[in-house]
Amino acid sequence: MGAETGRRQAPSLSISLLNSSSASLTILPVTTRFHLQNSHSRLSCTCCIYILYIRSGLRLQPSLNPMEEATICTIWNAVGMSLDQRFAIIRSIGLESTDEDDIRRLLGKKVAPVCYVWCDPSPSVHIAQGIMMVINVRKMVKAGCRVKILIADWFARMQHKFDGDLAKIRTFGLYMIEIWKAVGLDLNGVEFIWLSDEINSHSAEYWALVMDIFRNNTLRKITRCCEIVDPFMLNRNINDSFDPKNVTASTLFTPCVHCAAILLQKADIWLLSMDHEEDLHDKLIRQYCKGMKHERPIILSHNKLPNLIEHPELAKNGDPSWAIFIEDREVYLSYKLSRAFCPAKVAEGNPCLEYIKYIVFPWFGYFEVLRKEENGGSRTFQNMEELIIDYESGALGAGEVKLALAEALTKILKPIHDHFANNCEAQNLEDEALSSIPRY
């Protein structure tokens, strides 16, 4: 086997051959370097292996640095999957992208590409941050990606969230990690990074990049990029009151430093937060990298949950009814959904159906509507197509959808609420994190 495979190359790991006569290695799609040894000889070789399993007689002994070890761990997730299968998993995360050909090439070239996920610590955790992100991270890990969640504490401070207190922001970041833990995210499968630490550790490189992005962009382009809604704080666009007297300098500063923070990380793929608009990466990252010959990461934009309020422009600023948050208990969640916009027999643009499509179906694999027999009996939908047919025909009413959605979301959030209710350390963290947030 050594003579056959010694021509190929890959990352290092070592295997001890306990019984050379009975041991055998089943091949799988991982290129790696390893050492075979027994009492008589030691053989070093590099080979392309397709390890589905290791038969009796071999003991695997990792001899990797942490970065290599993370790569090997995620490799196992891609075992047995074709390139098309891995691409389909990543493609299912979000919107159509001009980078789809790049994604295919990347997956064909790298078994374990590095994927960064941007996370904004914001007062109250939107269900997209708590649940949708976990769904997407699991997909990334399943496709073999090494996932790193970047908690943008430095940006929260710059935007004066939590009164600009970095200690409070960090506490809230830890609270978000505890939520992901409670909802079932395997914390061993991801790495958490604080943006402030990254900037402090690479300050010379980061600020040089910021200045270069500033120098290569016009004020007009930057102001366009400031047309970003912060859905965690406002229900309106910043341009609704775009007046030099009302806009802080940090608002105009944000797109360039944000762009630099993304390019600072050596990522193959970026999954941006739900409030990042196309302008930010299309008009800044894409054009800057093209003009400066800078290596550009692939940008994924996941589907965004719509506003639950029918006329958000008329709603009070800061009205929490516009979305479902992780902190919403059953009664309040049901109250929000009872008021949610859900036009009868209209599926397109229906926010309640969007919640079902992007939260309920990916989480459970089905959507269940409980009804009495005289009302047609209970119905379990296996996919969105079935649900849309019944809804648009009138066989399923808006009230029934709202009740079933409230029930499904309550089930999803229950383990989180139970975790914080029954774990003293988690409860103290939650109390500390939420203590400085105004409640409505």
Image (tube, rainbow, N blue to C red):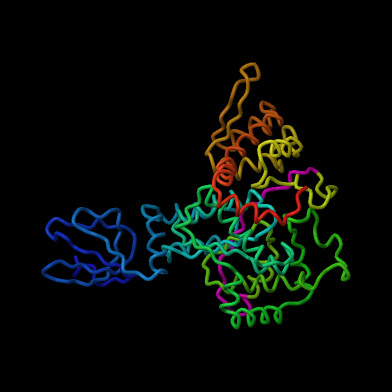
**In front: 121, or 387?**
121
Indicate the quadrant where residue 275 lies. bottom right
Name the magenta segment's main secondary structure: loop
Identified at 72% across, 67% down, the residue is 164
The magenta stretch spans which residues?
289-310
**In front: 160, or 349?**
160
Percent coordinates x, y for residue 349 in the rendering = 71, 43
User: Can residue 131 be seen by looking at this rendering?
Assistant: yes
Percent coordinates x, y for residue 245 in the rendering = 89, 70
253 versus 423 height, above or below: below
Percent coordinates x, y for residue 409 in the rendering = 62, 39
User: Can residue 362 be seen by looking at this rendering?
Assistant: no
Percent coordinates x, y for residue 300 in the rendering = 59, 60
Identified at 66% across, 43% down, the residue is 354
Identified at 53% across, 48% down, the residue is 182
194 versus 275 height, above or below: below
Task: Determine whether, in the image, residue 191 is placed left or right of residue 394.
Answer: left
Residue extending farthest to the top is 374
392 versus 1 height, above or below: above
Indicate the quadrant where residue 116 lies. bottom right
Task: Determine whether, in the image, residue 108 is placed left or right of residue 52.
Answer: right
Identified at 58% across, 40% down, the residue is 414
Whether residue 307 is in magenta: the answer is: yes
